[in-house]
Image (spheres, rainbow, N blue to C red):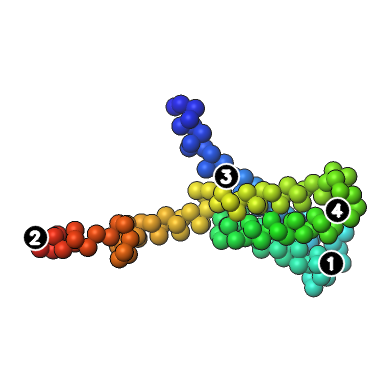
Amino acid sequence: MSKDVFFDIWSPRMLSVLRIVAALLFVMHGTAKLFGVPHQPQFDNLQFISLEGLQGILEFAGGMLLLVGLFSRPIAFILSGDMAVAYFMAHFPKNWLPILNGGDLAVLFCFVFFYLWLAGPGPWSIDAMIRGAARAREAQHPLPGTIRHHPESSHSASAR
């Protein structure tokens, strides 16, 4: 197997792995806030109707959807913006450098999610399964007016 073939095969798969790992890490932040697992003392008295409570809901629900690859692009876009807002609200006022203000993870999540919005979820996702099923249906029953639909070929086939 040539190097090009190897990279052509594994690049989309690693996109899925990146999505899954980032989502798992993100979900853990949500479960710590909402369910106390893993236990983080700073979330012991978390109010669900608060910014941190909303953040926990976004982390858990958005992370789970991203984990399985369902609605990946819109979810990744929302989470990217969420992490940008989190960085500028919680970290930037302390210092502008992420390494000095503790915001490096927020910046990393922001740009990973932004990349996933642009690149898509990869082949190991529910979105890819849905897209593949839709393409298979379209190939069997093309919509009128599409390139795959040839009315003249159906007339000639029925005339025979």
Q: Are marks 1 and 3 in contact (CB under 8 Å)?
A: no
Using the image, determine if residue 49 lies above or below residue 3. below
Q: Residue at x 30, y 57 (%)?
A: 148
Q: Do the CB atoms of the residues marked 4 and 3 lie less than 8 Å apart?
A: no
Label whose residue precedes the other's in the sequence (2 or 3): 3
Instruction: Choose top left, top right, bottom left or bottom right for residue 142.
Output: bottom left
Q: Which labelled disc corresponds to residue 107? A: none
Residue 4 in the figure: left or right of residue 86: left
Residue 128 percent location from the top left of the image:
48, 54
Label 1 is placed on what type of residue? Leu
Q: Are marks 4 and 1 in contact (CB under 8 Å)?
A: no
SS at mark 4 in the image: loop
Q: What x and y, as percent, mark residue 20?
A: 61, 49
Left or right: where does residue 120 sit relative to residue 61? Answer: left
Q: Is residue 31 left or right of residue 71?
A: right
Q: Secondary structure at mark 2?
A: loop
Residue linked to disc 2: 160
Label pair 1/2, CB-CB below 8 angstroms: no
Look at the numbered discs 2 and 4 and tell me whether their residues touch, using CB distance below 8 Å.
no
Read off the residue under disc 4: 92
The residue under label 1 is 46
Residue position marked by numbered label 3 in the rendering? 15
Q: Earlier in the sequence, mark 2 or mark 4?
A: 4
Query: Of tags 1 and 2, which is closer to the observer?
Result: 2
Q: Please report whichever mark, 1 or 2, sits nearer to the chain's N-terminal start.
A: 1
Report the Cα–Cα distance between label 2 and label 4: 73 Å
The single residue placed furthest to the right in the displayed view is 94
> How far from the left and from the top, in percent, is residue 1?
44, 27
Counting from the top left corner in percent of width and height, residue 40 is at 84, 56
Residue type at mark 3: give it: Leu
- Determine the secondary structure under disc 1: loop
